[in-house]
Amino acid sequence: MAGSSIGTIFRITTWGETHGEGLGVVVDGCPAGLSITQEEIQQFLNRRKPGQSKYTTPRKEDDQVEILSGIFEGKTTGTPISMVVYNRNQKSKDYSQIKDIYRPGHADYTYDAKYGIRDYRGGGRSSGRETIGRVAAGAVASKLLEELGITISTYAREIGGISIDIERFQKEEIFRNPFYMPDKEAAVQVQEYADRMMKEKDSMGGVIECVVEGLRPGIGDPVFEKLDANLAKAILSIGAVKGFEIGDGFAAASSNGSVNNDAYCWQDGRFIKKTNHSGGVLGGISDGSPLVFRAAVKPTPSIAKTQSTAGKDGEEIELSVKGRHDPMIVPRAVVVVESMAAITVADGLLMNMSASMDSVKKIYE
Amino acid sequence: MAGSSIGTIFRITTWGETHGEGLGVVVDGCPAGLSITQEEIQQFLNRRKPGQSKYTTPRKEDDQVEILSGIFEGKTTGTPISMVVYNRNQKSKDYSQIKDIYRPGHADYTYDAKYGIRDYRGGGRSSGRETIGRVAAGAVASKLLEELGITISTYAREIGGISIDIERFQKEEIFRNPFYMPDKEAAVQVQEYADRMMKEKDSMGGVIECVVEGLRPGIGDPVFEKLDANLAKAILSIGAVKGFEIGDGFAAASSNGSVNNDAYCWQDGRFIKKTNHSGGVLGGISDGSPLVFRAAVKPTPSIAKTQSTAGKDGEEIELSVKGRHDPMIVPRAVVVVESMAAITVADGLLMNMSASMDSVKKIYE
Amino acid sequence: MAGSSIGTIFRITTWGETHGEGLGVVVDGCPAGLSITQEEIQQFLNRRKPGQSKYTTPRKEDDQVEILSGIFEGKTTGTPISMVVYNRNQKSKDYSQIKDIYRPGHADYTYDAKYGIRDYRGGGRSSGRETIGRVAAGAVASKLLEELGITISTYAREIGGISIDIERFQKEEIFRNPFYMPDKEAAVQVQEYADRMMKEKDSMGGVIECVVEGLRPGIGDPVFEKLDANLAKAILSIGAVKGFEIGDGFAAASSNGSVNNDAYCWQDGRFIKKTNHSGGVLGGISDGSPLVFRAAVKPTPSIAKTQSTAGKDGEEIELSVKGRHDPMIVPRAVVVVESMAAITVADGLLMNMSASMDSVKKIYE
Amino acid sequence: MAGSSIGTIFRITTWGETHGEGLGVVVDGCPAGLSITQEEIQQFLNRRKPGQSKYTTPRKEDDQVEILSGIFEGKTTGTPISMVVYNRNQKSKDYSQIKDIYRPGHADYTYDAKYGIRDYRGGGRSSGRETIGRVAAGAVASKLLEELGITISTYAREIGGISIDIERFQKEEIFRNPFYMPDKEAAVQVQEYADRMMKEKDSMGGVIECVVEGLRPGIGDPVFEKLDANLAKAILSIGAVKGFEIGDGFAAASSNGSVNNDAYCWQDGRFIKKTNHSGGVLGGISDGSPLVFRAAVKPTPSIAKTQSTAGKDGEEIELSVKGRHDPMIVPRAVVVVESMAAITVADGLLMNMSASMDSVKKIYE
């Protein structure tokens, strides 16, 4: 089926595999007249590049994005923006070991069951590199939102069970440690834990938090195109993500109405909420408060530590995955979460333009 | 925008408001030849009927579903199935109090911001009654899955912070207490807590868990039509849901690869996973294990307890919501979660039919 | 599959069969704040009512439309508009004759081949009554377009091979004869031919022409959401339509570039085209001229005249279809063509709102 | 908006402009296990290559297709197939003349009106080269259909008003003359007329006919996903196409029911129609007869002959378009029509797989 696209108006279609020629994306429906350059997109992409620290694997991939269409004299033309990153540094032989083995935690078995065919080289379409297209598109969506005064901030709230402390929260710290944690001390603890995990040849997971500010109320469509429902789908579509929550999320489940309700008040000629337990969305529509949501990322499945599994013919196998892999996915996933958030919010915003006859008349003249 | 539909092949479109003539749904794409009766659908719907206990509000709504098309001589014809439930017991005057007030925790403000118009009578399209259409459609989807040996079980795993105990898990208990809890003792504790909350004019939330068994591997489409991504969207689209997790979910975030990975083994001529941390989905595709996911439900926003809020003109108001409302949403939401799960799995299953040339040839002859 | 819906933003979902409880439509994505009443919609629907003359069959159907949701205090709320017309005058026994026969020119055989099940009562989903939902939705779309200064005029350009004469074209004539022809003399000739056809128990086809005025340039999206491509789909989806052409259509095929090109000139501060061979669309986008297109309608398949055909078991049968049927479809189809045009143009117009950053900023403020 | 995609299950997304880096397509939803090679796709593409005769412009474009993903060891993997053709032979300076002029018959003005921005270099997204993506995708779809015994034949039925003669119809002739006409004599007449037109610096249009054989009945979904409705949209989306008709098309409009109806008969254990006025589709569903439809192609707008038009500032201009252009579009469009037909039929066929519970059970086991 057409699983490679997401979005209704601002629609992206990604393509490519780890060991194919390259990976890319087609961004369709971006309004014309948006200023954007290859450098801006490249900058965004670089945030996902491995080899940024010893905690993410040393694959020095040279991911240079090329814009093949859709931008003319520095502005989008309204026609589809096609971008590609060519694969230069993928080694097939590293993966021959697992050609006939189902690796635990990976989609090997599920792909075989679905298609009867499996491209065993590096995970194919379920690999981490598949996110290149998402991030390139995310760069464009972010620029669009910026033009409208909407900003997004994403970071690791927790890694390996070690949480940041709100009291020590410093936005600038996000880009100063390899874990994208806005808390210096927590980052140090994570480093120690990570060193231990690497010795034990194991891996660790985490929680990524994303905050969208400046989004005016009214974005999102009941009943099934709710903003938080679309965010959930976009985020869960990222490999290794196993949970999504918005506002107080699962904590709201054990709360009470008198506490969880955000009361309104009037301030500076605007309605604002005194608290933000809702996380910025009520009834599926943005409520004017910052959007706050979290994604649960499972530990990297590929570990050098020995695991029991079975081969294609049913025989029991002790597997120790050689080759290159990340001890933690979270740092690389931060910009992917941010990209999917930008894409989803942009789409919702564009969909909202026709919500009332007043808006329609404003445009149609 | 077209927010009233969800699904690609098995597609449902709901319509209706609390104080309109009625509510309904159009189910499109259900394969022809499925045996289904009005009684079966009614039975499913009755699980959401309020008035089942003193813990859900005493609105004795008489929700009888009528089938207007799509079923002929007891079987689906392949044409759209239209179903309606007429509104018989809605009192407008109960809601006049809040005509010009933004109730905390409700979508009043967000609807106004979006449309410039708001039907204040009972929550309109964001009301709990909107779920009637979903559940009627869910009945059809469930029947379809049953025919293929797939069953779904849904229950309250936690209410008001009180969790079930796995050791005391009894499936039959689900339908014996008003909370749909599979643990008799926990249900009693919840009852005590609920009584206390009702005295305090407050409300409570909970967590609903859903288990799908019998789903063969291969269902779900990478990259954006992943089964868990679509489930997340379907579940988050339910009012009052603030979180979704699958398998170990957020617990996986603090786990390690060696623990979280489900190893394969060969048993009775089939591949099975020894554990199920993944919750039945890997790489977005069903892996043969039971699908296990959870939804976080926030406390009912409408409470009689006094809250501070603001009116349309900015003035501060002390609000005590009269009228009829549930102290807890969870019990009514259980069948809604099950319905959305059935609809999503059915759609994924039908989408999967064209995954390989072998399947295509089997059908095309 | 989900074949019951059409449109991206302004999206309609029809449901119902001739011999089910009723027929209806859900209109989703209509902007909030549009003034519309049941009377306006009923008026539109009445244009398709049979029994308007002796040339359309004497089924005095009492097609009263009911609005079940989406309109509050005389304006659309932005939530889906559900409308239904109940079946009151359908006789099953008239169709028992053809229960096991494949009628020539009808979808009997194709439905059986597709579903393995066929509701033989009156054509089910392929019946003319299926258009009720389209027309009710068309009424809403037409109102929306009217509010923006866009008007649509539809009429029979040709029936039974008898064409109108442009020199005698009179818009008011359209509603003065039973054939919706804007040429009095041609209408008389058609009447004579129709009388002859009815004696011979045969039927006749025709060509419907539709003109949309006031549509500003820029509506339609390259590459696959072209305005004329979407119109073609919408029009071909109407039963009995076998052709679509826009502007000079098939006549352009034998023309030359020097003749067919519409040259531009500047008039009253606007660009206009001196001619309109294009029919109002260039490159799939409206060009400011009136939209002019035509639909070819085949002769009614159901005729009392004896035809040879085969029964389900292969036996040869001489069939003379009793029961009620129209000697010509064209007059009833005129408002259906107009409805589909309105729906398609409305959807294109709403999709166009996000075409440029300038428009987006205008709305987002 | 997302106008760059078409299809529900077999879905294609094209991208690229004449003067960008390249043009391409992403084909999503092609079942896994289909054998296809770069040579097969290239062969298909070569049919659209200009420079095949003196009647199509002498742009010796070297359109080599590269497969960037989706095919592994000679078979489709079920993941998206991305293909690209790089632009090597486009000269910008040829088009500087028309930077500030609206060329008659082109989408210059409409693009400006829509986006406020126009890439004037060679027609951008409305250029003939945009069809490269469609044809590459068409090659894949054709292969899929071939595997199921479905074949497509497309040819010019009429050019410049000169029609083929059915009596002289010879399928092999299609590939023996530069016009793709299956009638040798007609081709000679067209040649003479074309020579005359080139002298007069004018252009000519034509009608393309397409026949699909081997399609079993049952493909297509009522009400809005009718096979002929989808074909109409796909064909009208091709630049320069101004009309679509199926079966007898516009001729049916002046026919009678007794003639136009196709009677059934039983032959060799199958139901067949004695005639094929319907063109292979009834009630929007394939009826077992060959699918026969036609596309009306207007004359090439770009002609060297002098035309009056207006410039951006309203001034009157006499325009004689220099640069390279085709005196007739029809020959190049033949394979584009065939491609869109293949894509549409393939999508319909895949959508049909879930039409009945019998089919679903066959696959689900």
Image: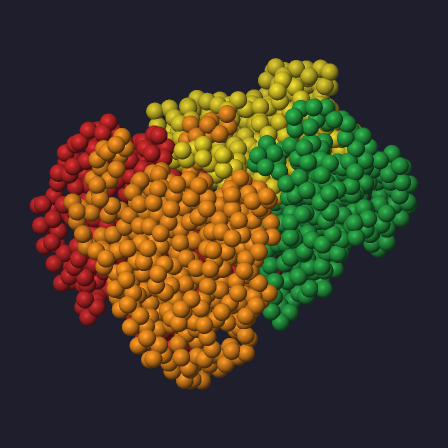
Chain colours: A red, B orange, C green, D yellow
Indicate left or right for C215 with B124 as reference.
right
Q: Residue at x 55, y 43 (%)?
A: B75
Q: Nearer the viewer, residue A337 or C105?
A: C105
Query: Where on the picture, by quarter, is residue B173?
Result: bottom left
Q: Is residue D156 above or below residue B168?
A: above
Q: Nearer the viewer, residue B152 or A311?
A: B152
The percent position of residue C145, horizontal first and vertical second, equals 66, 58
Q: Is residue A171 visible?
A: yes
- The number of numbered discs placed on residues in the rendered structure image is 0
Indicate left or right for D301 with B139 as reference.
right
Q: Residue at x 33, y 34 (%)?
A: A113
The percent position of residue B187, horizontal first and vertical second, equals 29, 65
Q: Is residue D15 above or below residue A267?
A: above
Q: Nearer the viewer, residue D328 or A365?
A: A365
Query: Where on the picture, by quarter, is residue C162?
Result: top right
Q: Is residue D177 visible?
A: no
Q: Is residue B215 above or below residue B339?
A: above
Q: Nearer the viewer, residue A316 or A322?
A: A316
Indicate left or right for B362 with A18 as reference.
right
The percent position of residue B362, horizontal first and vertical second, equals 46, 27
The percent position of residue D9, horizontal first and vertical second, equals 48, 39
Q: Residue at x 64, y 32 (%)?
A: C109
